[in-house]
Image (cartoon, rainbow, N blue to C red):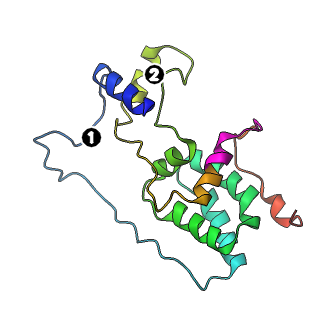
């Protein structure tokens, strides 16, 4: 709520750049929405195949932040997750159509916050125009599960590990711990 309040107070002060399509006279004809196929549970998928697929899907997200977060989470957790947890993780990373939602839910952030970067306000003010005040939404009940709790705890990085890139794949050939 603090992030939401901060955005409401700061939003009128931030110069807006770019096209959002929210003009009252906008016809919306130039907007292109590509429908995603609906997520489907795979009840007959063997567990080894499911783990391998989820590992791949955790690494290939389309945005670097989630590639790093989810691939490291998958490395640490997929091998010991139950079948039910794997199904909830599968739904979490594949049903939402916006990867930023997953990132915000996992990290508890609401986009860029003041003081996040070095430099001056003028150098970063344009970055604020990329985010709308309503962008960070609470985690929907169907995704607010034990797996989301595990992902949130992982995202806190309590051990202060350096997480700048995805893990190498050599660990796949090591015996499970």
135 up-or-down from 43: above or below? above
57 up-or-down from 103: above or below? below
Mark 2 highlights which residue? 124
Q: Is residue 11 left or right of residue 138?
A: left
Q: Is residue 12 left or right of residue 99?
A: left
Picture disc at residue 20: 1
Per the model, the C-alpha gap separating discs 1 and 2 is 19 Å
Q: Position of residue 116 (x, y in %)?
A: 54, 25
Taking depth in this image into account, of 84 and 136 the one nearest to the observer is 84
- Per the image, label 2 sits on a secondary structure element best described as helix
126 up-or-down from 91: above or below? above
Q: Quadrant of residue 24?
A: top left
Q: Is residue 168 left or right of residue 12?
A: right
The residue drawn where x is 71% and y is 64% is 78
Q: Which residues are magenta?
A: 152-161
Residue count near mark 1 (Cα–Cα under 10 Å), binned few <14, some 14–19, many ≥20: few
Q: Is residue 45 left or right of residue 104?
A: right
- Per the image, label 1 sits on a secondary structure element best described as loop
* Viewport quadrant of the N terminus: top left
Q: Position of residue 70 (x, y in %)?
A: 63, 53
Q: Is residue 156 rendered magenta in the image?
A: yes
Taking depth in this image into account, of 37 and 109 the one nearest to the observer is 109
The residue drawn where x is 55% and y is 56% is 61
The residue drawn where x is 43% and y is 54% is 98
Q: Position of residue 95 (x, y in %)?
A: 46, 64
């Amino acid at each position: 709520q603090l992030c939401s309040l901060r955005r409401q107070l700061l939003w009128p002060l931030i110069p807006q750049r770019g096209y959002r399509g929210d003009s009252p006279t906008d016809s919306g004809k130039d907007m292109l929405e590509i429908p995603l196929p609906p997520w489907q549970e795979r009840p007959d998928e063997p567990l080894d195949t499911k783990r391998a697929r989820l590992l791949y899907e955790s690494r290939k997200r389309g945005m670097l932040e989630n590639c790093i977060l989810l691939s490291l989470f998958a490395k640490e957790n997929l091998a010991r997750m139950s079948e039910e947890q794997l199904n909830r993780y599968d739904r979490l990373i594949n049903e939402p159509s916006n990867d930023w939602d997953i990132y915000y839910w996992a990290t508890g952030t609401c986009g860029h916050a003041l003081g996040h970067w070095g430099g001056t306000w003028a150098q970063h003010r344009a970055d604020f125009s990329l985010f709308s005040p309503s962008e960070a939404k609470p985690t929907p009940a169907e995704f607010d599960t034990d797996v989301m709790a595990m992902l949130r705890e992982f995202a806190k990085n309590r051990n202060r590990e350096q997480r700048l890139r995805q893990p190498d794949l050599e660990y796949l050939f090591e015996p499970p711990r």
